[in-house]
Image (cartoon, rainbow, N blue to C red):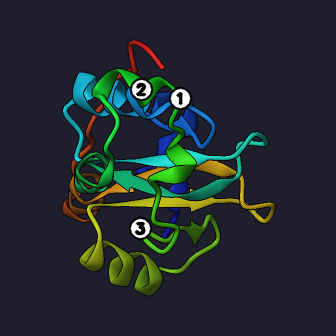
């Protein structure tokens, strides 16, 4: 299996940096209608993913007004054990095991730098012999 053939490259993936504000993360998730997105550190290494539910839990635990979200950072919201990444060299069994547990799989290189993601839709299309065109991300 060649992960690169089914992977959505990082340049076409929506993600946030851990030092982005919670407001920026909420905007990214809602603008693209995703339920979760990857989180990167300052060197573009994958640190985890953040989901709608993570934002909801974070907001429910806060006592300050919503306008204060600009001061809160994604690193305060993220669950680092959520949506673990796989290596770009992973075999088919690893990819299938991961996609059974999560909606998308972050794919990283040997430096843990995000290369892209594999979605369930793209994996199923790959095995069905169908090609799904990549759609550019309009804003990052």
Instruction: Classify mark 3: helix, strand or loop.
Output: loop
Q: Compare residues 59 and 32 and report the one nearer the observer.
A: 59
Q: Please tell me which residue is depicted at 19% across the width and 32% down the height of the picture.
A: 33
Residue at which label 2 appears: 68
Please identify the quarter of the rendering in which residue 96 is found: bottom left
Label 3 crowding class (10 Å Cα cut-off): few <14, some 14-19, many 20+? many
Give the side of residue 14 with respect to residue 4, left or right.
left
Q: Compare residues 26 and 84 and report the one nearer the observer.
A: 26
Give the side of residue 59 with respect to residue 140, left or right.
left
Instruction: Classify mark 2: helix, strand or loop.
Output: helix
Q: Earlier in the sequence, mark 2 or mark 3?
A: 2
Label 2 crowding class (10 Å Cα cut-off): few <14, some 14-19, many 20+? few
Q: Please tell me which residue is depicted at 41% across the width and 69% down the height of the picture.
A: 82
- Estimate the spatial distance between the alpha carbons at disc 2 and disc 3, rounded to whole Å: 28 Å
Residue at which label 3 appears: 83
Question: 108 above or below 56?
Answer: below
Residue 45, numbered label: none
Question: 66 above or below 9?
Answer: above
Foreground tag (3 vs 1): 1
- Estimate the spatial distance between the alpha carbons at disc 3 and disc 1, rounded to whole Å: 25 Å
Give the side of residue 117 with respect to residue 127, left or right.
right
Q: Compare residues 48 and 61 and report the one nearer the observer.
A: 61
Q: Earlier in the sequence, mark 3 or mark 1?
A: 1
Residue 71, numbered label: 1
Labels 1 and 2 touching (C-beta < 8 A): yes
Please identify the quarter of the rendering in which residue 137 is found: top left
Foreground tag (2 vs 3): 2
- Estimate the spatial distance between the alpha carbons at disc 1 and disc 2, rounded to whole Å: 6 Å
């Amino acid at each position: 299996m060649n992960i690169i053939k089914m992977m959505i490259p990082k340049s076409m993936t929506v993600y946030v940096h851990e030092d982005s504000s919670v407001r920026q993360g909420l905007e990214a998730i809602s603008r693209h209608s995703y339920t979760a997105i990857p989180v990167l550190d300052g060197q573009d290494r994958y640190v985890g993913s953040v989901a709608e539910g993570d934002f909801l839990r974070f907001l429910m635990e806060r006592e300050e007004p919503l306008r204060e979200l600009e001061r809160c950072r994604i690193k305060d919201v993220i669950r680092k054990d959520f949506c673990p990444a796989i290596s770009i060299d992973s075999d088919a069994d690893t990819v299938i095991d991961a996609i059974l547990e999560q909606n998308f799989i972050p794919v990283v290189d040997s430096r843990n730098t995000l290369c892209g993601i594999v979605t369930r839709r793209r994996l199923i299309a790959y095995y069905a012999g169908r090609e799904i065109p990549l759609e550019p991300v309009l804003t990052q």
